[in-house]
Image (spheres, helix red, strand yellow):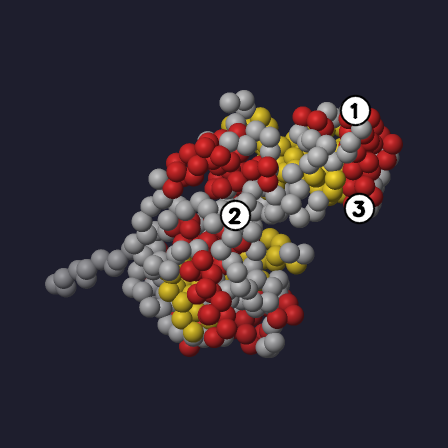
């Protein structure tokens, strides 16, 4: 099969993680960009990337790149692409446009001009035209304009890859699945210890943690990908890729536990865990983090998404102080990570973070912070055992 250039779109700050995932799967010629990672692979690898790259939002196939500073240049350049290679007159398409340009400021206008150029080409050549379909198009076209540079791609994924297929019920403002997976990988979670999410909501972090621990492909539960409507779709090859990935799953010998104080959240989380077929790995309890103590003897890996923004209906200073106090007093030998957009509130945790990463939760700038809680004092951790007392004369 022919190798092609592809682009994995991801969140800001996760580019190196996406590149590492692609490298581990066998991608070639990896190049890191802004919110994107370029790579080379064949059609089978594109199927694999859609199934298995946890931090990818979309896998795109670039088909055109040109400069445009006005709608006439844009229209003419779109018309130079041979659209009959990708689409038939009786099929449908949809256009997503993303702009970072002083020359183009309205994405809907850009999408309309691209549509006009495609439709006019078909009318001139065949007398017929393909129609627009937002929900179930034959192909999705991605238009990206960065200053005067325009890239046209086919979207092989369809709906964003954060839509894993297991989450049927959510709470208010649930964490995005790709964001959750990226945070877990950034935290170093590899399934080699016990895991706790003490404010688990609808269970997304728990499910993504279990899938990483067991090396289960991120999108194995997804119902549909856009490439299934492409002219070169090979269902037998796709099944072969799935079989290959599933043969690389592994057993997990520790615990994955979630707490939430709201009965409704626990109910939703249990349903989502069941949808993901991960019941045997995940235990969820109705409980407040502030009333709990560490339940396991060995190292514990903790990642959570405390309520913040409009959902935080408690005193911010007191809430974050309680987080810090609970970690210090009840969770020795723990690697604790959490994400928050309450940047000022971090001052009240009362612990110095070992690491701090800038991430975005939707449009909110947030911090992903790491606190190391030792079994004894940090000073004691680095001291050698004292020598035995010398006998006195």
The Cα atoms of the two marked residues, 2 and 3, are separated by 29 Å
Q: In x, y percent, where is residue 281?
A: 35, 58
Determine whether, in the image, residue 316 is placed left or right of residue 383. Answer: right
Determine whether, in the image, residue 364 is placed left or right of residue 389. Answer: right
> Do the residues bearing badges 2 and 3 touch, measured as CB atoms within 8 Å?
no
- Closer to us: 188 or 134: 134
Residue at numbered disc 3: 108
Does residue 248 lie above or below 168 as drawn? above
The Cα atoms of the two marked residues, 3 and 1, are separated by 26 Å
Residue at numbered disc 1: 125
Q: In x, y percent, where is residue 267?
A: 46, 70
Image quarter in which the C terminus is found: bottom left
Q: In x, y percent, where is residue 134?
A: 70, 47
Name the mark nearer the viewer: 3 or 1.
Answer: 1
Tag 1's secondary structure? helix
Residue drawn at (47%, 42%) of the image: 52
Residue drawn at (55%, 32%) of the image: 233
Residue drawn at (46%, 64%) of the image: 271
Residue at numbered disc 2: 223
State the mark number for residue 63.
none
- Closer to us: 199 or 379: 199
Does residue 135 lie above or below 38 as drawn? below
Q: In x, y percent, where is residue 250?
A: 33, 46
- Could you tell which of marks 2 and 3 lies nearer the N-terminus? 3
Does residue 32 lie above or below 4 as drawn? below
Tag 2's secondary structure? loop
Determine whether, in the image, residue 85 is placed left or right of residue 278. Answer: right
Residue 250 seen in this snapshot: yes
Residue drawn at (36%, 44%) of the image: 249
């Amino acid at each position: 099969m022919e190798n092609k250039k592809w682009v994995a779109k991801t969140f800001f700050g996760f580019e190196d993680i996406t590149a590492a995932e692609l490298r581990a799967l066998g991608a070639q010629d990896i190049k890191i960009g802004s919110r994107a990672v370029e790579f080379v692979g064949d059609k089978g690898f594109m199927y694999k990337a859609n199934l298995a790259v946890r931090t990818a939002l979309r896998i795109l196939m670039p088909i055109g790149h040109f400069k445009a500073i006005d709608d006439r240049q844009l229209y003419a350049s779109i018309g130079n692409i041979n659209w009959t290679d990708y689409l038939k007159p009786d099929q449908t398409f949809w256009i997503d446009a993303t702009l970072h340009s002083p020359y183009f400021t309205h994405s809907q206008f850009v999408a309309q001009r691209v549509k006009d150029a495609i439709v006019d080409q078909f009318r001139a050549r065949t007398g017929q035209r393909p129609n627009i379909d937002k929900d179930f198009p034959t192909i999705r076209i991605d238009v990206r304009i960065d200053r005067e540079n325009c890239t046209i791609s086919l979207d092989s994924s369809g709906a964003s890859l954060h839509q894993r297929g297991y989450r049927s019920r959510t709470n208010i403002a649930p964490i995005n699945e790709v964001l959750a997976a990226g945070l877990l990988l950034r935290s170093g979670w590899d399934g080699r210890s016990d895991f706790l999410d003490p404010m688990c909501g609808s269970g997304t972090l728990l499910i993504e943690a279990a899938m990483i621990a067991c090396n289960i492909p991120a999108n194995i539960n997804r119902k549909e990908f856009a490439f299934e409507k492409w002219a070169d779709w090979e269902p037998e090859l796709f099944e072969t890729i799935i079989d290959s990935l599933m043969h690389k799953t592994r057993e997990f010998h520790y615990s994955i536990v979630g707490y939430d104080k709201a009965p409704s959240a626990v109910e939703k989380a249990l349903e989502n865990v069941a949808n993901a077929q991960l019941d045997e790995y995940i235990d969820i309890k109705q409980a407040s983090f502030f009333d709990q103590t560490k339940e396991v003897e060995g190292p514990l890996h903790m990642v959570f998404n405390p309520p913040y923004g409009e959902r935080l209906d408690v005193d911010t200073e007191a809430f974050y102080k309680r987080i810090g106090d609970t970690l210090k007093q009840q969770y020795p030998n723990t690697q604790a990570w959490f994400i928050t957009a309450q940047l000022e509130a971090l001052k009240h945790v009362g612990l110095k973070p070992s690491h701090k990463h800038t991430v975005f939760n939707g449009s909110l700038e947030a911090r992903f912070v790491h606190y190391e809680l030792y079994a004894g004092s940090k000073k004691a951790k680095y001291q050698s055992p004292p020598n035995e007392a010398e006998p006195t004369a």
